[in-house]
Image: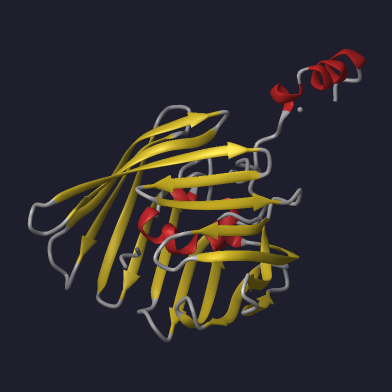
Amino acid sequence: MKRKLLIPFVLPALCCILFFNACIKYPPITPDNNVPNDRLLKTWQLTSNEIPTNTYQFYYNNKKLVDSIVLSQGINFFTYRVHRKHNGQIDSVVATEYLNKGSGHVYFVARNYQYSNGLITHYDYHVYDNFGNHDVMLFDISHEQQKMTIRYNTIAHEFTFNDKQDVVRMRDNGDRPFNGTFSYNTGINPLFYARDLYAIITDLATYNYEYLLSKHNTVKKNYNDGYSVNYTHIYDDKGRLTRSDFKDVRHFGTQSFSYTYY
């Protein structure tokens, strides 16, 4: 896997009742840009007993939107460069790998990002190998009230949100299929304010959607067959998450996530 608005008038309220579909709120998976002080994520490090340590360094533009990400993995590193339109929406993402201090090789380009109501609904994911081969996957994202579904090829990832902006149920049919639920504490997930991260580090996201979308931190993950995963979190004196430890024998084993902030 490559890393991998209350206007105090009655009329608007009546309109909302009469035209309910026009007032449905989409699932709050893309937060606004009002990042709280000291909450802008600087690094995210993933360690596991099954895969190499990955350290992501985040860089932002003056609107606090992700501008680029550098992934370090031993002596190798990878870059994700985010090209945006004037309105801040993603135009394309280019990922380049640099192995053993060699020259860079573009291994994926995501483009043709489409939006509806400020939410991403589609992008094309182009993958290139070192032999000149090229493959493309079309990602389609649907948004219903408190539900989001990401589809590509024959794979579907379904997420159900609660009113606290957390994924409470996830179901997918990928190579590591999952159908289960999550419970949360009130701590803020550092990845929440890296807006649209799931559609930037797309090679990683398909394995880690559950960590990228929710506003708060998971305390327990329940597989539908009874297996469960418990999470231990450590916070600093500002209430920011600095480390999470857990063991999931079905998904990359014993793991730790560490975070630093700007």
Please determine whether, in this image, residue 150 is positioned above or below residue 47.
above
- The colour style of the image is secondary structure
Near-viewer residue (132 or 152) = 152
Q: Residue at x 55, y 61 (%)?
A: 210
Instruction: Please tell me which residue lies in front, 120 or 34.
Output: 120
Residue 259 visible in the shown view: yes
Quarter in which the C terminus is drawn = bottom right
Above or below: residue 258 compared with residue 148: below
Q: Residue at x 83, y 22 (%)?
A: 17
Q: Left or right: where does residue 29 sit relative to residue 163?
A: left
Residue drawn at x 55%, y 70% is 259
Foreground: 138 or 127? 138
Q: Nearer the viewer, residue 231 or 222?
A: 222
- Give the quarter of the figure containing the N terminus: bottom left
Looking at the image, the residue that sits furthest to the left is 131
* Farthest-out residue, front: 225
Question: Residue sitting at 76 percent across and 18 percent down?
Answer: 19
Q: Is residue 104 above or below residue 236?
A: above
Point out residue 53 in the picture as x, y percentages from the top left corner.
Answer: 39, 78
How many discs appear?
0
Q: Position of residue 216 (x, y in %)?
A: 69, 60
Q: Position of residue 209 (x, y in %)?
A: 51, 58
> Is residue 262 in view from this perspective?
no
In the image, taking residue 161 as reference, residue 210 lies left or right, namely left
